[in-house]
Image: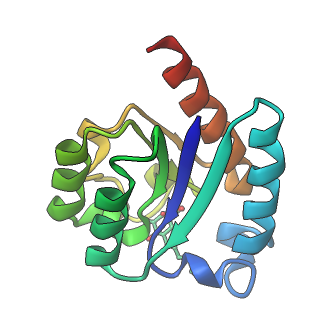
Amino acid sequence: MKLLVLNGPNLNLLGEREPGIYGAASLADIEAECQAFVSTFGSSVRFEQSNHEGGLVDALHGARHDTDGVVLNAGAYTHTSIALRDAISATRLPVIELHLSNTHAREEFRHTSMIAAVVVGIIQGFGADGYPLALRALHQHLSKK
Ligand code: CA2
């Protein structure tokens, strides 16, 4: 299976700031762990990150012909982006929504997800461990199709 991990705005700064909320691992650390993890079940994974809403939409469009499924941490666009929701619906890619933090334990404006209704499922609150958890969930989901 060909999988994509797509990260949104500011997640390129992971490990540099706010370790109390987002943990100490950098995006490169997370990518290395994901790479090792998916190789245990014979899949491949690639990674993209964009700080721009349109960049995330483009990445989903670009994935639609050669990718089986996506783990998406859309960052703050989770709470605002109808364009991202439409892109998930339009591409019909199976997407697992992921958050490092438990957004429901945080500010009210983080309690709403614009994409929740069009994703397969959501993993949040487990820090960087959420990435391999989400890849496992995506793999299981795709295996049943
Ligand atoms: O918990 C998550 O993974 C979030 O998607 C992270 C977003 C936030 O807007 C969402 O509500 C929940 C923010 C990512 C910011 O990343 C930073 C990384 C290092 C330092 C500061 C911010």
| Residue 67 drawn at (x, y percent) | 46, 45
Name, please, the residue furthest toward the front: 66
In which quarter of the view is residue 22 placed?
A: bottom right
In the image: residue 119, left or right of residue 8? left
Residue at position x 58%, y 57% from top? 101
Task: Please give left or right for residue 6 compared with residue 93 in the image.
Answer: right
Residue 132 in the image, given as x and y percentages of width and height: 71, 43
Task: Give the quarter of the image for residue 8.
Answer: bottom left
Name the residue located 70 percent from the left edge and 72 percent from the top edge: 27
Residue occupying the point 24% across, 37% down: 117
- Residue 105 in view, yes or no: yes
Q: How many marks?
A: 0
In this rendering, position of residue 117 left or right of residue 15:
left
Does residue 130 show up?
no
Q: How is the image coloured?
A: rainbow
The front one of 42 and 128 is 42
From the viewer's perspective, tell me whether residue 35 is left or right of residue 4.
right
Classify the position of the N terminus by image quarter.
Answer: top right
Q: Hey, which residue is sitting farthest top in the picture? A: 144
Above or below 20: residue 138: above
Residue nearest the viewer, comparing 51 with 36: 36
Where residue 41 sits in the image (x, y, percent)? 76, 29
The quadrant of the image that shows the C terminus is: top left
Residue 109 higher or lower than 52, as above or below:
above
Residue at the spot x=73%, y=87% of the render? 16
